[in-house]
Amino acid sequence: MQSMIRVLEKNVADKIAAGEVIERPVSIVKELVENSIDAGADSIVVEIKNGGKSYIRVTDNGCGIPRNEAEVAFLRHATSKIETAKDLNAIETLGFRGEALASIAAVTHTELISKTKDEKIGVKLLIHGSEVLDSSGTGCPDGTTIIITDLFYNTPARQKFLKSDSAESGQIIDFMSQIALAYPNIRFRFINNGNVTFSTTGKGDLLNAILSVYKLSEYKDLVPVNRCDDLGSVTGYISKPSLSRTTRRNQIFFVNGRVVSSKVIERGVTEGYKERLFEGRYPVVFLFIHTDPEKLDVNIHPNKREVRFDDESQIVELVSTAVKEALGTKAAVIEVKNVF
Ligand code: ADP
Ligand code: MG
């Protein structure tokens, strides 16, 4: 059950690493999708046009926003996810700063349509550059739809820094691919310029989600990773040494549910494959690491994806052992013999 949306007291707001700036279309997609996940949705549809510059729509079947709280949600530091500074130590939601909707609505044309399951009539809001132009009741399904058009229409300086449609949509595709793998229990559907790029079943099977997103038949042969020790657990799928790439683009790491980039995890992977791969070749790797939240620092800038581990060598050891173990399975051994 979602708490009420309220503006954080100033002393709480001041403790939060501030400055969530909407820089690119992908930042908007990320914030909206994370809100949908926090709202408990198990089905999320994302549609973009022109790399998200002209159109972004995110529809979910989550808890919805009560009609009388809809305008509050767009105020800065308005959130239903934390209330006091103490809550900052135990964050279980993806968002908590209460800044995203306010930041997005300030630089776009935003339309919100939302309904909770307890309400008969939903709410529709129209906001242009923070100004509420229309607020009315509307018939709509349970859940939330947010439509963003005309990105940066009132900040031409920022508009200039946008890249080509394909560069912007490339970033959104990467984000959508990663989030769909991080949440195989959620049904994702991603539409780009009218074409369905991928849709997942939401049935919880990771390999199935990987195949739905990447559509590469060679990914059918990925081997499962499953290791647990005192420090934490590593699960996921990795390629046999016979399948490798020239870049790390197909290596995705999640730590406690968040996508991260990490040299430490990369080192663990490299060590795990050791001499089984030629120099300059990188395996395909989707790894989920779960570890005690107290032993890492994710409280860094909202747009950054780095994570800091207290004990780096232990993480390298955990990852490399997990990889070695997975490759030691029968199927992988046979494959290695064929290559060398
Ligand atoms: P935060 O996620 O940090 O709380 P946001 O500005 O992203 O801040 O959202 C403000 C509030 O609006 C959220 O706390 C939540 O209560 C509500 N909200 C936003 N998006 C949704 C959604 N898709 N479904 C339900 N509630 C939402
Ligand atoms: Mg949010």
Image (cartoon, rainbow, N blue to C red):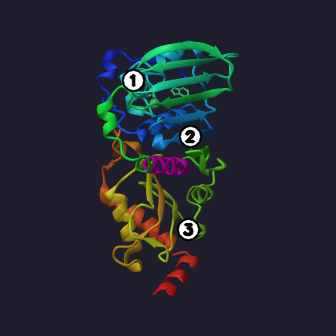
Residue 315 locus on image (x, y percent): 36, 58
Q: Earlier in the sequence, mark 2 or mark 3?
A: 2
Provide residue 225's location: percent of width, then percent of height. 52, 64
The correct choice, above or below, for 282 with respect to 161 in the image is below
Q: Residue at x 36, y 15 (%)?
A: 9
- Which is in the foreground here, disc 2 or disc 3? 2
Residue 20 falls in image quadrant: top left
Q: Which residue is mark 2?
A: 47
Q: Residues within 10 Å of mark 2 (few under 14, many from 20)?
A: many
CA separation, marks 1 and 3? 44 Å
Q: CA distance from mark 1 to mark 2?
A: 21 Å
On the rendered structure, is 45 left or right of 93? right
User: In this figure, which residue is indicated by the disc labeled 3?
Assistant: 222
Nearer the observer, 49 or 29: 49
Residue 46: in sight, yes or no?
yes
Magenta range is 169-182
Circle nearer the viewer, 1 or 3: 1
Of the image marks 1 and 2, the number of the one nearer the N terminus: 2
Q: Which residue is mark 1?
A: 106
Is 176 contained in the magenta span?
yes
**Amino acid type for the residue under numbered disc 1:** Ala
Q: In which quadrant will I find the C terminus?
A: bottom left
At numbered mark 3, what does the secondary structure look like: helix, strand or loop? loop
